[in-house]
Image (cartoon, rainbow, N blue to C red):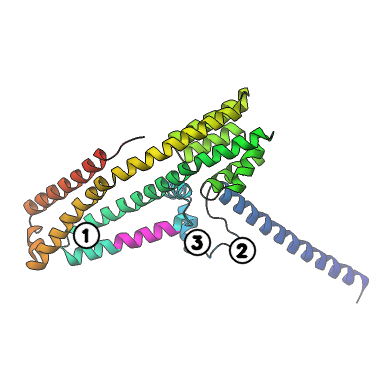
Amino acid sequence: MSELALLALGATLLCCTLAIAGLHSWATGRAQRQALVDRLSGGPVHGPASRTRRFVAVDRRLRHTRLGRAIGLRLAATGLDLTAGEFFTYALAGVIGLWLVAASALAPFFGPLAAAVGVWSAVIFLNWQRQKRIEAFINQLPDVARLLANATAAGLALRTSLTMAAEELEAPAGEELSLVADQLTLGRSVDDALGELARRLPSRELVVLVTTLVLSNKAGGSVVSSLRNLTQTLEDRKETRREVRTMLSEVNATAFTVPLLGLGSLLLVNSSNEGALARVTGSPVGQVLMLIALGLYAVGFFVIRRLGKIEV
């Protein structure tokens, strides 16, 4: 083999090696960037320890839409280990299942109504999970303020105090503070990082804590005494919220019992006289009367929920 052929073969092998190394470096960097984006957005981290994701193609297409971005933001606030594609697919399957069950068990007229209730239930589920996470975070706020006060009293900077608190506390406070610490590491200001935390988990207690930290970071002052006073105040509010929730538990149970009684009466009528609901909803007058009755049950539900809602 001539020297020119050997030179060409060597150059080809070198180019192939460099191409493989470049492709591997690009894939590794892309995976690290996606993991960082998921971590900072509150989404699931795709790593070796994470579970296998389902409906990846649906999730990829959905995230480019307005609906997908809205679902992703709500899921980030709930802390659920779900992607937007997974939640959308599960919710769609549930809506279709409710449509078929209501149409077969009651009457075809109730199929679209059950589907609408399924969509509303999916939204309510996300709001409930978000509120549940906010409540858990509020219950940990006294510990957060206490740790920040002790770390500040020891002479640590606010960024270091937040990182230490993130390591000491359990979820959800540990996860949220860890996200704030990561954002500070990437160069975001304390005001922006804490402000985003307050928008992600809105509550009066967190707003007071964030305002205290931001003002102390800007103007200085006796942040230790302020945080310790705030700790006692948060403890008192925590006990008050627990007492109010206990007193309103019966009202909340009544709110959910009212629509269940309506559903039970429909099933009872249809089981005692098979096909009665189909005949009633077969005419426009019957459909209008049925919608009015269901609307009254819905109004009763929302009125009772509103009466049992007390802001503390």
Q: CA distance from mark 1 to mark 2?
A: 43 Å
Which class describes the residues within 10 Å of circle 2: few (<14), some (14-19), or many (20+)? few
Q: Magenta region, mostly helix, strand or loop?
A: helix
In the structure shown, which secondary structural element does the residue marked by tag 3 occupy?
helix
Residue, disc 2: 48
In the structure shown, which secondary structural element does the residue marked by tag 2 occupy?
loop
Q: Are marks 3 and 2 in contact (CB under 8 Å)?
A: no
Q: Is residue 217 visible?
A: yes
Residue 217 percent coordinates (x, y): 62, 28
Q: 260 or 155: which is nearer to us?
A: 155
Residue, disc 1: 111
Q: Is residue 13 above or below residue 92?
A: below
- Please tell me which of labels 3 and 1 falls first in the chain: 3
Q: Is residue 255 above or below residue 189?
A: below
- Please tell me which of labels 1 and 2 falls first in the chain: 2
Is residue 92 magenta-colored? yes
Q: CA distance from mark 3 to mark 1?
A: 30 Å
Q: Quadrant of the N terminus?
A: bottom right
Instruction: Give the residue type at disc 1.
Output: Gly
Instruction: Give the residue type at disc 3.
Output: Val
Is residue 174 magenta-colored? no
The magenta stretch spans which residues? Answer: 86-96
Q: 78 or 156: which is nearer to us?
A: 156
